[in-house]
């Protein structure tokens, strides 16, 4: 199931992110701000447990997260969302998966993975700014499940309908949270209207 975050402030930030005149520094800041807004929504179903604390006025029963959380950015563009999500969940552990889309075949190619090994069914936030064809995301989820991670949520800044469909068909148990569902993929498999190449705009490369 996918969830598009229809919040006016997020849409305002997303418009600035898309603007071709937005420079690298502002782009990085906006990407992290948008990630925080989406992550806030994605956290609404986390498990909590009772805990006893003392306020300056006395004892009380509060709530604390009971999930262990792992954040997994898909390299390299996913790294541009990492600070935003860690601002909200500073104690989360971080894994990395290197996955790129071959420019000729449009198929995902894995080149790196480093994941925590000593956790019991943590909640995994898989992050990548753009969900285009869905191939890289499906391949990464395949890898995560093969390593024993089964509780997975995917967070993207923008998504194409085609990519959402691909992920939902391959992994119907994975929830998708996105800042916007764009119109379509063009013949080159780029999201329209999109925001360009997120990695290039984050890191100032071509």
Image (cartoon, rainbow, N blue to C red):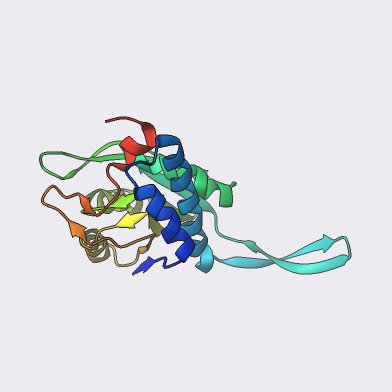
Could you tell me if residue 161 is visible in this image?
yes
Left/right of residue 142 with respect to residue 61 in the rendered view? left
Q: From what the image shows, is residue 168 above or below residue 88?
A: below
Residue 109 horizontal/vertical position (percent): 21, 40
Out of 140 and 178, give the one closest to the viewer.
Answer: 178
Residue under the point 14% across and 45% down: 106
Name the spot of residue 169 as percent of width and height, x first. Answer: 23, 65
Pick the residue in front: 5 or 118. Answer: 5
* View extreme (front): residue: 21
Q: Quadrant of residue 185?
A: bottom left
Residue lying at 23% horizontally and 62% vertically, measured from the top left: 183
Label total for image = 0
Foreground residue among 97 and 28:
28
> Is 103 on the left-hand or right-hand side of 202?
left
Q: Position of residue 45 (x, y in %)?
A: 51, 68
Q: Please determine whether, in this image, residue 8 is positioned above or below residue 16.
A: below
Q: Is residue 75 visible?
A: no
Residue 201 spot, x, y in % from top left: 34, 38
Pick the front one: 116 or 203: 203
* Placement of the C terminus among the 4 image quadrants: top left
Extreme-top residue of the structure: 205
């Amino acid at each position: 199931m996918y969830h598009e975050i229809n919040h006016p402030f997020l849409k305002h930030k997303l418009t600035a992110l898309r603007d071709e005149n937005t420079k690298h520094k502002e782009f990085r800041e906006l990407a992290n701000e948008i990630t925080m807004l989406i992550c806030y929504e994605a956290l609404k179903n986390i498990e909590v447990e009772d805990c006893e604390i003392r306020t300056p006025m006395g004892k009380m029963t509060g709530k604390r997260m009971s999930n262990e959380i792992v954040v997994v950015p898909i390299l390299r563009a996913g790294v541009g969302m990492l600070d935003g999500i860690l601002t909200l969940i500073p104690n989360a552990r971080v894994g990395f998966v290197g996955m790129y889309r071959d420019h000729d075949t449009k198929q995902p190619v894995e080149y790196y993975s480093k994941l925590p090994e000593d956790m019991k069914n943590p909640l995994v936030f898989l992050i990548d700014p753009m969900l285009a064809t869905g191939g890289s995301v499906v391949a990464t989820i395949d890898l995560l499940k093969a390593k024993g991670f089964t509780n997975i949520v995917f967070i993207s800044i923008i998504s194409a309908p085609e990519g959402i469909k691909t992920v939902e068909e391959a992994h119907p148990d994975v929830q998708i949270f996105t800042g916007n569902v764009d119109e379509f993929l063009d013949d080159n498999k780029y999201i329209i209207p999109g925001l360009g190449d997120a990695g290039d705009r984050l890191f100032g490369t071509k």
